Image: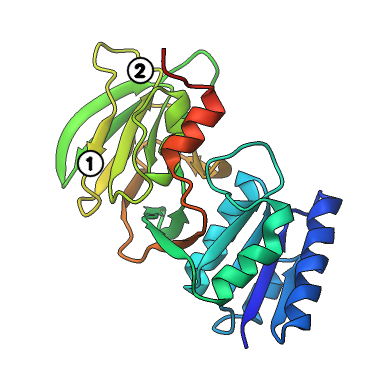
């Protein structure tokens, strides 16, 4: 008997309906399920879930990946949004996806996440950690240290440190490199740097990257697009790759290159 948890997008009636449909199918086949509507409900299922199913778009999948990371269980994405990078199961194929998972006919894609420390608080980022300017029309000064050695002080609108998964998020809009999602690496990308050197750096995940706010202007600290806190001059963000991956269920062999070709309408001449 398997236990499956659904994380349904709270603003989509379709997500709730599909969660109920999936729950009924699992019950009819002798399995248990839970529909998560509040974060607090996760605690009651710690250690008792075999699969977490995300019902929504990439935003819901990111939240599901956070929960799956904490529970150390695999996560499967059912796509109810536009074509995204993280979800692969079509709603009409949900029962087939369950049959394949329960029968063992699937692969696991292990994705590195980021461990982020700031102001003596610990965070996990699936996509990226960001320091961004607060005042419009002004840059911030950010000193970057890599493996405890000073690299460069950036005058920019901000700095992004992303995982391979996050390379197709904010980093992509900054013209940063696209990494294979299985790759254990970090990318450090400046946001609109006011300097000649504007290149992203691909870094080893086991070397700490420290970003320190210099000068007199404060910054905003964000994790996966969510504003977390203000960072005053002298404040530091420390980031490295976590040794524990988040495990994503892969069923149909869809890879990042196929998604990129579909999303951007790429074709051969």
Percent position (x, y) of residue 202? 25, 36
Quarter occupied by the N terminus: bottom right
| Tag in front: 2 or 1 | 1
Please indicate whether residue 76 sits to the left or right of residue 29 in the image.
left
Q: Is residue 248 above or below residue 166?
A: below
Which residue position is annotated with label 2?
193
User: Badge 2: how crowded within 10 Å, few (<14), some, or many (20+)?
Assistant: some
Looking at the figure, which quarter contains the C terminus?
Answer: top left
- The coloring applied to the image is rainbow
Q: Disc 2 vs disc 1: Cβ atoms closer than 8 Å?
A: no
Where does the image place residue 24, in percent across and percent down from the top left? 81, 75
- Is 28 drawn above or below residue 214 in the view shown? below
Using the rendered view, name the quadrant where residue 41 is placed.
bottom right
Query: Which numbered dot is residue 203?
Result: 1
Which numbered disc flags the more N-terminal residue, 2 or 1?
A: 2
Q: Residue at x 61, y 83 (%)?
A: 2
Front-lying residue, 15 or 114? 15
Q: Nearer the viewer, residue 37 or 260?
A: 260
In the image, farthest residue toward the left: 149
- At a point 62% along the width and 37% down the height, the residue shown is 83
Describe the element under mark 1 as helix, strand or loop: strand
Instruction: Name the side, left or right, on which 1 lies relative to 69.
Output: right
Residue shown at the point (48%, 41%) measured from the top left: 221
**Total numbered labels placed on residues in the image:** 2
Residue 131 visible? The answer is no
Image vertical order of residue 69 relative to residue 150, above or below: below
Viewer-side residue, 237 vs 125 = 125
Q: Tag 1: Cα neighbours inside 10 Å, few (<14), some, or many (≥20)?
A: some
């Amino acid at each position: 008997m398997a236990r499956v948890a659904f994380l349904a997008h709270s603003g989509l009636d379709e997500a709730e309906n599909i969660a109920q449909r999936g729950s009924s199918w699992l019950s009819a086949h002798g399995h248990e399920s839970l529909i998560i509507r509040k974060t607090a409900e996760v605690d009651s299922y710690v250690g008792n879930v075999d699969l977490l199913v995300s019902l929504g778009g990439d935003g819901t999948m990111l939240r599901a990946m956070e929960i799956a990371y904490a529970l150390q269980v695999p996560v499967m994405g059912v796509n109810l949004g536009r074509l995204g990078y993280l979800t692969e199961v079509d709603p009409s194929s949900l029962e087939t996806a369950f049959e394949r998972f329960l029968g063992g006919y699937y692969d696991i894609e292990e994705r590195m996440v980021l461990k982020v420390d700031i102001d003596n608080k610990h965070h996990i980022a699936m996509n990226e950690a960001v320091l961004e300017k607060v005042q419009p029309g002004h840059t911030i000064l950010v000193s970057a240290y890599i493996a405890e050695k000073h690299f460069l002080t950036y005058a920019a609108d901000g700095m992004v440190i992303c995982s391979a998964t996050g390379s197709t998020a904010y980093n992509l809009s900054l013209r940063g490199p696209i990494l294979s999602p299985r790759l254990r690496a970090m990318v450090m990308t400046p946001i609109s740097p006011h300097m000649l050197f504007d290149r992203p750096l691909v870094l080893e995940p086991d070397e700490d990257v420290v970003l320190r706010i210099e000068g007199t202007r404060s910054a905003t600290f964000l994790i996966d697009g969510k504003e977390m806190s203000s960072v005053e001059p002298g404040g530091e963000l420390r980031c490295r790759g976590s040794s524990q991956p988040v495990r994503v269920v892969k069923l149909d062999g869809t890879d990042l290159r196929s998604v990129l070709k579909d999303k951007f309408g790429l074709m051969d001449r």
